Image (cartoon, rainbow, N blue to C red):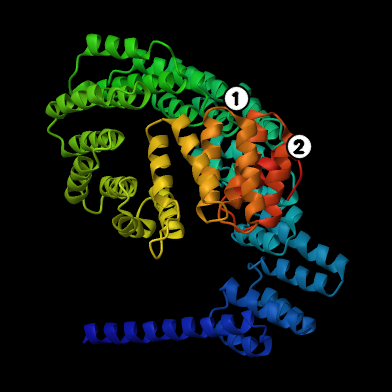
């Protein structure tokens, strides 16, 4: 019997909760659609059933205010205060009702009553502060939150305080609040980085960057902790000041010899952003300090990448020194892959590169590592125009690793090799699959190649220049840039006014940039803009011109012009965010 009574009570309770929730959903819908009179009836019922629910009361009062029933709202709030005097958050609602009636003195009096209740340790302090914030009474909200924390040292409203200071534009106090929050509990560090990143940029002279740096330094002097080095390093990375970030990570490493993860990550970031000096410093430290062979060999590999990118004269010798010291084995396998790549694409010795990889294949039983070797072998076979054998290696990886990143990479390489051998139909079939299912980088490359083929495939046996363009593309892949530029010139002349012309101009411009023939590159990009102002390569050309003038020719005024064209004339461009950021940095304008 007791069980039946319990089940019946539970059923009735569930039915009541469902009915109440359903009523609230309907009331909210009326409220959002501005049907306040209909919403009032529902909110009145909800409030009567749940008098302690502040959401129902606040919504009801808002409906009265939106329909100019201020006296009704006032009467309801006064009755509520009389019946439930401990619900002191009602003072805030009453004050705001007076404010809506332009009775400012009465409003301030009620706001002060609310604040006084916070001082007296009201259990509704958080609700009071939040109501002030919702009503945009930010100074009162600050006083309320601070009052709560004065009464209860364990209470922590650092996030709320920081957000309010941010809304007020008082960024110095906002950053101080964030830093104080980390000081109280370091588990907030990542959250603070996320929130602070909304207000800073990569300009170290930006006012907000300076304020945050000062807040961290001030706290680090009064309360030295590792977390301040971490936070400063993060800020310097944001500002692309990688050497300064390294100084902070070195300080952390001096206190904890195992604290190498930050330096490893910094090395990678510096390398990606072409600060090769800092990247090398990071990798040197990892090589010297790490106790893990995998980290050591990864750092050795990355140092070689730095040497290759910066075209150091003794790279071959460095490879041999590494193999002499550590041997050719599974520990150095990725260094062997890098050596094969160097031999092929830099030294034009693919035969030796293939031998290195064939030997490397025997050093591992890992199917993932073998897949990496096969992909590199395929790349070298494409370099030698041995497309069919390359396709075998790519297809093996694609088959073995279905629904894996390696399979996507292999599929793209299949498409690329097919394109180079003029099997455009098969290349398009592979690229079509990749456009929607691959990682962003592969998807972008796939979409770009797909468009190149689609826009320029021959129709009715009339040549469109696609075969010649694919040949030029292969020459560029082989780092035979001079030959590629020459063939592209022939395509531009032969297929003038045809779709392939702008593709050829753009590809040639990119090769001119590699050869530091910047005037020629600018001439090509400009021709693309003139050919068709609505062409698919216009955005790319505008951005490339901005980058050339900004990074290579040290002409910020000219760079700004091209970034500005993207911002105002090409709002859907994939370069919009980056162009706006760079324009702001160059001109200091707010867009």
Within 10 Å of the Cα at label 1, are there few (<14), some (14-19), or many (20+) other Cα atoms?
some
Q: Where is residue 21 in the image (x, y as percent from the top left)?
A: 47, 81
Q: Give 339 or 440, whichever is nearer the viewer.
A: 339
Say which residue appears at 59% left-offset and 54% top-offset.
Answer: 573
Q: In this view, does 222 lie above or below 181?
A: above
- At 25% from the left and 42% from the top, the residue drawn is 387
- The residue closer to the viewer here, 32 or 207, is 207
Query: Counting other residues with Cα less than 10 Å from the Cα at mark 2, is it few (<14), some (14-19), or many (20 or more)?
Result: some
User: Where in the figure is residue 273, as x and y percent of width and height?
Assistant: 52, 31
Residue at horizontal 73 percent and vertical 51 percent from the top = 591
Of the pair 80 and 510, the residue shown nearer to us: 510
Q: In this view, does 174 lie above or below 56?
A: above
Residue that appears at 44% across and 32% down: 483
Left or right of residue 209: residue 382? left
Disc marking residue 581: none
Against 158, is 328 above or below?
Answer: above
Give the left or right position of residue 380, taking residue 225 as reference.
left
Q: Position of residue 541 (x, y in %)?
A: 60, 46
- Disc 2: which residue: 557
The reply, left or right, for residue 382 in relation to residue 310 is left
Would you say residue 148 is visible in this rendering?
Answer: no
Residue that mark 1 sits on: 220
The answer to which quarter of the image holds residue 374 is top left
Considering only order in the chain, which callout, 2 or 1, is on the residue closer to the N terminus? 1
Residue 171 placement (x, y as % from top left):
71, 42
* Nearer the camera: disc 1 or disc 2: 2
Determine the CA span between mark 1 and mark 2.
40 Å
Q: Can residue 431 be spotted in the picture?
A: yes
């Amino acid at each position: 019997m007791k069980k039946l009574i319990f089940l019946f009570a539970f059923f009735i309770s569930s039915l009541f909760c469902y009915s109440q929730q359903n009523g609230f959903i309907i009331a909210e819908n009326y409220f959002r659609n501005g049907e306040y009179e209909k919403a009032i009836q529902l909110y009145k019922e909800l409030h009567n059933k749940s008098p302690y629910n502040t959401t129902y009361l606040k919504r009801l009062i808002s409906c009265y205010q939106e329909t100019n029933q201020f006296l009704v709202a006032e009467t309801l709030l006064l009755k509520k205060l009389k019946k439930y005097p401990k619900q002191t958050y009602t003072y805030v609602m009453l004050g705001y009702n007076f404010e809506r009636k332009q009775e400012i003195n009465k409003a301030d009096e009620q706001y002060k009553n609310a604040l006084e209740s916070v001082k007296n340790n009201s259990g509704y302090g958080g609700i009071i502060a939040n109501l002030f914030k919702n009503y945009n009474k930010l100074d009162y909200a600050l006083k309320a939150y601070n009052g709560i924390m004065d009464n209860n040292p364990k209470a922590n409203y650092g996030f709320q305080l920081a957000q309010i200071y941010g809304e007020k534009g008082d960024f110095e106090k906002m950053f101080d609040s964030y830093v104080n929050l980390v000081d109280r509990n370091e588990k907030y560090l990542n959250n603070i980085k996320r929130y602070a990143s909304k207000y800073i940029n990569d300009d170290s002279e930006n006012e907000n960057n300076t304020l945050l740096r000062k807040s961290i330094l001030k706290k680090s002097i009064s309360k030295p902790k590792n977390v301040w080095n971490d936070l400063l390093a993060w800020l310097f990375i944001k500002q692309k000041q990688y050497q300064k970030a390294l100084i902070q990570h070195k300080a952390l490493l001096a206190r904890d010899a195992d604290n190498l993860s930050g330096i490893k990550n910094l090395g990678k970031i510096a390398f990606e952003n072409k600060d090769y000096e800092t990247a090398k410093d990071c990798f040197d430290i990892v090589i010297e300090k790490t106790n893990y062979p995998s980290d050591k060999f990864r750092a050795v590999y990355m140092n070689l990448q730095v040497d290759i990118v910066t075209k150091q004269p003794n790279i071959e010798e460095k490879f041999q020194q590494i193999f002499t010291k550590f041997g050719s084995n599974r520990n150095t396998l990725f260094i062997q892959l890098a050596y094969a790549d160097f031999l092929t694409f830099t030294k034009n010795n693919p035969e030796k590169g293939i031998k290195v990889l064939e030997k490397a294949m025997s050093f591992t039983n890992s199917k993932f590592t073998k897949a990496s070797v096969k992909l590199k072998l395929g790349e070298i076979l494409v370099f030698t125009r041995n497309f069919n054998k390359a396709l075998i290696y790519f297809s093996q990886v694609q088959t073995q690793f279905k629904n894996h990143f390696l399979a996507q990479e292999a599929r793209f390489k299949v498409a690329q090799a097919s394109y180079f051998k003029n099997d455009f139909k098969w290349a398009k079939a592979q690229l079509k699959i990749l456009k929607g299912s691959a990682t962003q980088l592969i998807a972008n490359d796939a979409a770009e190649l797909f468009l190149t083929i689609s826009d320029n495939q021959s129709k009715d046996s009339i040549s469109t220049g696609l075969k010649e363009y694919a040949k030029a593309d292969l020459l560029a892949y082989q780092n035979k840039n001079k030959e590629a530029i020459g063939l592209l010139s022939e395509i531009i002349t032969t297929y003038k006014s045809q779709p392939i012309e702008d593709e050829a101009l753009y590809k040639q411009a990119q090769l001119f940039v590699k050869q530091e023939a910047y005037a020629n590159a600018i001439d090509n990009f400009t021709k693309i803009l003139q050919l068709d102002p609505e062409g698919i390569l216009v955005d790319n050309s505008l951005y490339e011109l901005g980058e050339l003038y900004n990074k290579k020719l040290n002409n910020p005024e000219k760079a700004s012009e091209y970034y500005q064209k993207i911002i105002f004339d090409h709002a859907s461009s994939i370069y919009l965010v980056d162009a706006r950021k760079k324009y702001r940095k160059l001109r200091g304008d707010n867009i």
